[in-house]
Every structure is written in C-alpha cells, then in structure tokens.
Image (cartoon, helix red, strand yellow):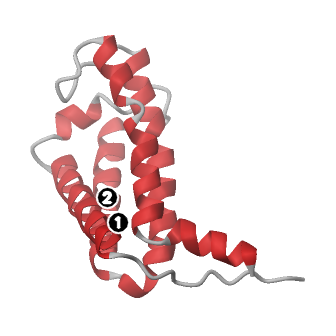
C-alpha cells in the first residue's frame, strides 16, 4: 500500500498576500452571516435543504470564521486548510445556484443576469484557496515524486 505525503510547498509573497486577503474575506463574511447580512444570506439557502435555513446561515457563518482564522494563523497546516477551504467553496456553490434558479434578490443581485455573472467567481475562490496556500503545488509535487 502506497502512502502519499503532501509536503508544504513554499509560497511567494504574492500567494501569502492572497491567502491573507482570502482569510480576511472569510472572516468578514462569517461575521456578516451572524450579524448585518444574515437576511441576505438566508436567500442563498436552497429551499430543498431539510434543515432550518437560519441554522444553515449561522453554522456556515461559524465555519467561515474558523476557516478565515485558519488561513490567517495555521501556517504549518496551510496546505490542509487550503483543501478544506476549497471544499467549503464547492459545498456552498449550490446556494449561489439556488439564488439564481429561485430568482432571489440579495447582495444587490436583483436580476438573473447579475446572478449568472456571480457564478464564475466561485471557481475563482476555489483556485485562490488552492493556489495561495500552496495546496495545489504540493499535490502536484507529490504526484511527481
């Protein structure tokens, strides 16, 4: 049985800056979930989820705060954190799609065109999470070795 070890890839100043910005973004969004933007985030909870929408907003806000702080302070674990943040962005993407399909207005997205225009930014967040933490490069390096 072969075990793959993911090494921490050295990151550049630009990557570190992007990681810090992403961490602050998640921290601010998480606090927004719990306070001033709670109603806006409720409109992104897919109606088919069998969980109370307010609970989803509160839990996802808590997770965003933890992920933001992890990006900022868990530097020795940044590769793992990068993969976890990327997975989180994948898991919340259905909320963005639900906002489009259900024609829900939030965050100034009050037309289908605006809601469509937002969708490509989720893959960008995934890429930034993997790139800024060195997660993608570490995974590629592990495949070469």
Q: CA distance from mark 2 to mark 1?
A: 5 Å
| x, y percent for residue 31 | 17, 55
| x, y percent for residue 78 | 43, 77
Crowding around mark 1 (Cα neighbors within 10 Å: few <14, some 14 to 19, many 20+) is many
User: Which residue position holds label 2?
Assistant: 64
Secondary structure beneath dot 1 equals helix
User: Which residue position holds label 1?
Assistant: 67
Which residue extends farthest left?
36
Residue 141 visible in the snapshot: yes
Label at residue 140: none
Give the vertical position of 108 relative to 70 (above or below): above
The N terminus, quarter of image = bottom right
Crowding around mark 2 (Cα neighbors within 10 Å: few <14, some 14 to 19, many 20+) is many
| x, y percent for residue 95 | 41, 33
Report which quarter residue 27 is drawn in: bottom left
The foreground one among 43 and 73 is 73
In percent of the image, x 63 and y 71: which residue is there? 139
Q: Are marks 2 and 1 in contact (CB under 8 Å)?
A: yes
| x, y percent for residue 145 | 75, 82
Report which quarter residue 120 is drawn in: top left
In percent of the image, x 29 and y 81: which residue is there? 73
Give the vertical position of 87 relative to 49 (above or below): below
In percent of the image, x 35 and y 60: which residue is there? 63
């Amino acid at each position: 049985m072969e075990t793959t070890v993911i090494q921490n890839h050295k990151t550049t100043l630009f990557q570190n800056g992007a990681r810090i910005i992403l961490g602050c973004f998640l921290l601010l969004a998480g606090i927004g979930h719990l306070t001033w933007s709670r109603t806006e985030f409720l409109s992104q909870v897919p109606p088919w989820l069998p969980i109370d929408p307010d609970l989803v907003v509160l839990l996802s806000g808590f997770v965003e705060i933890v992920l933001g702080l992890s990006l900022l302070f868990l530097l020795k674990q940044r590769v793992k954190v990068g993969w976890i943040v990327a997975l989180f962005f994948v898991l919340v993407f259905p909320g963005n799609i639900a906002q489009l399909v259900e024609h829900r207005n939030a965050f100034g997205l009050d037309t289908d065109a605006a809601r469509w225009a937002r969708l490509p930014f989720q893959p960008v967040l995934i890429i930034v999470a993997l790139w800024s933490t060195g997660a993608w490069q570490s995974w590629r390096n592990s495949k070469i070795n």
